[in-house]
Image: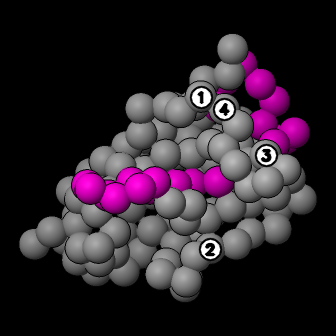
Amino acid sequence: QVQLVESGGGLVQPGGSLRLSCAVSGAILSIYNMAWYRQAPGKERELVASITRTYSTKTVESVKGRFTISRDNAKNTVYLAMNSLKPEDTAVYYCNALGAYSNAILSWGQGTQVTVSS
């Protein structure tokens, strides 16, 4: 059974930085395209950044230039470096594997809360 465990969230002031981690167990990370999602209160979960098996990355416009997704297959871990954080980045952040139609294909982990506030 594949498990996803997100960590690294917290409370940070606007303009601050955080680095999220997603540890994958029960599977070999290298076979998956991976992504980070977030869900803000009262909103639907949205895809924020993705990274393919060949390390090609994409980010949504709202975080472009501020968020960077990366992966370490040897550690079975995916990362999301977040800089210049804004209050609107406040959300629970999740990782998952991407299917052929950019859908999440694994069971969701518990997520990690990111709160940007002064």
Q: Is residue 11 left or right of residue 96?
A: left
Q: Is residue 33 left or right of residue 111?
A: right
Task: Tell me where residue 31 sits by quadrant.
Answer: top right
The nearer-to-camera label among 1 and 2 is 1
Inspect the image, locate mark 2, and give the three-letter code of the amino acid beneath it.
Answer: Thr
- Checking the image for residue 59, the label placed there is 2
On the image, the x and y values in percent for residue 76 come to 71, 36
Disc 1 + disc 2, Cβ < 8 Å: no
Residue at (37% x, 43% y) in the render: 112
| Alpha carbon distance from label 4 to label 3 | 9 Å
Viewer-closest of 45 and 24: 45
On the image, the x and y values in percent for residue 33 come to 79, 50
- Magenta region: which residues? 24-45
57 is higher (above) or lower (below) than 62 = above
Inspect the image, locate mark 4, and give the three-letter code of the amino acid beneath it.
Answer: Leu
Disc 4 + disc 2, Cβ < 8 Å: no
In terms of sequence position, does the residue under pointer 4 or pointer 2 come before the other?
A: 2
Disc 1 + disc 4, Cβ < 8 Å: yes
Q: Look at the image and tell me whether residue 80 can be seen.
A: no
The quadrant of the picture occupied by the N terminus is: top right
Q: Look at the image and tell me whether residue 53 can be seen.
A: yes
- Checking the image for residue 106, the label placed there is 4
Viewer-closest of 108 and 77: 108
